[in-house]
Image (cartoon, grey):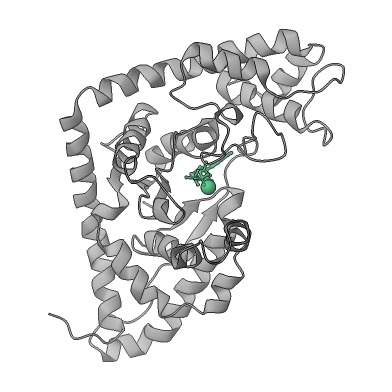
Amino acid sequence: KKRIVSGVQPTGSIHLGNYLGAIKNWISLQNIYETLFFIVDLHAITLQYDVQKLSKATRDTAAIYLACGVDISKASVFVQSHVRAHVELMWLLSSATPIGWLNKMIQFKEKSRKEGDENVGVALLTYPVLMASDILLYQSDLVPVGEDQIQHLELTRDLAKRVNHLYGGRKWKKLGGRGGQIFKVPEPLIPPAGARVMSLTDGRSKMSKSAPSDDSRINLLDPKDLIAKKIKTCTTDSFLGLEFDNPERPECNNLLSVYQLVSGKTKEEVAIECRDMNWGTFKPLLTDAVIAHLHPIQVQYGEIVSDPSYLDKVLADGAANAEVIAEATLSNVYQAMGFLRR
Ligand code: ATP
Ligand code: MG
């Protein structure tokens, strides 16, 4: 079985973008692949964060994974910081990462420009090395990536090849290792189209946990009336009729896509159904579809968080499974890099 890893940062409430772009796809992936889904708490401290909220957000994110249908009889669910090897491998990898590669990362350039050099930690620069460690540690075959992560996955691939070249093969064999590749070079798994959910208040920027306005996103745990209010007041346009793929109508395309995904209809069906609608008819339809789709998830979530010991056990078991794979990789890397083993 091929192996897949993926995760979400516990940086805020999980929204429809995280769900439709990532978590919902995991549910079908777990039936086909060996899957590890983690909560990337170590990534969540890269920018300023609220110390009082991190641990609760981590648990809530795990509970949402399960509520959305991640099945622990198929997938391992764990917290990144519970498997120490992530940070350990990151240090080893960072010695093989040229600074130039990191300086080129668009996300780093954008975020550091916005915050200013004196306000961002080194972790913002080295974030992609931790992400590479998350992936390479598990010898992952495939990584589902949103558009925003493609460049980081490319770096992961380059880094895997570089380490294999620097320390693998015959050199590793001479050190008593098994020789050959140290890391599997992972391939990107591009998600199905329509999986980039845009902000409710600006159809040209993506829906995001860290966007300041809560009205810009629908959170998975939003109550019904709040969902209704957010859709009622979201940005639209004054064209006649509704249509997909008109570049002048990003909001329209986004809301139709969301409707398509939550209703389970095809794009063609939605295009025909909504062709002659105006916003006043479409918005209640969308509202009902979103509420109906999220309702069972919210009920499940309530049940999961009502029993904290259950979640503790899920996360402990998940970390134990993950650790077995992670330790094997880490031990190989230490050996190949010439360290004296204990
Ligand atoms: P932050 O603003 O803190 O970066 P985020 O909303 O971007 O939060 P992440 O934790 O960075 O969420 O990403 C988790 C997963 O959700 C990733 O796989 C990412 O590609 C996906 N994702 C995030 N936002 C969207 C979106 N608007 N549409 C589709 N997928 C998304
Ligand atoms: Mg993000």
Quadrant in which residue 261 is drawn: top right
Instruction: Compare residues 101 and 12 and report the one nearer the observer.
Output: 12
Instruction: Compare residues 51 and 296 and report the one nearer the observer.
Output: 51
Instruction: Compare residues 316 and 29 and report the one nearer the observer.
Output: 316
Looking at the image, residue 200 lies above or below residue 146: above
Q: Residue furthest left?
A: 342
Looking at the image, residue 175 lies above or below residue 24: below
Q: Residue at x 33, y 33 (%)?
A: 60
Q: Residue at x 45, y 52 (%)?
A: 48
Q: Residue furthest right?
A: 240
Relative placement, left or right, of 166 versus 214 is left
Quarter of the image containing the C terminus?
bottom left
Q: Residue at x 19, y 30 (%)?
A: 308
> Whole-percent x and y of residue 56?
30, 37
Quadrant in which residue 81 is drawn: bottom left
Looking at the image, residue 34 lies above or below residue 128: above
> Whole-percent x and y of residue 234?
67, 22
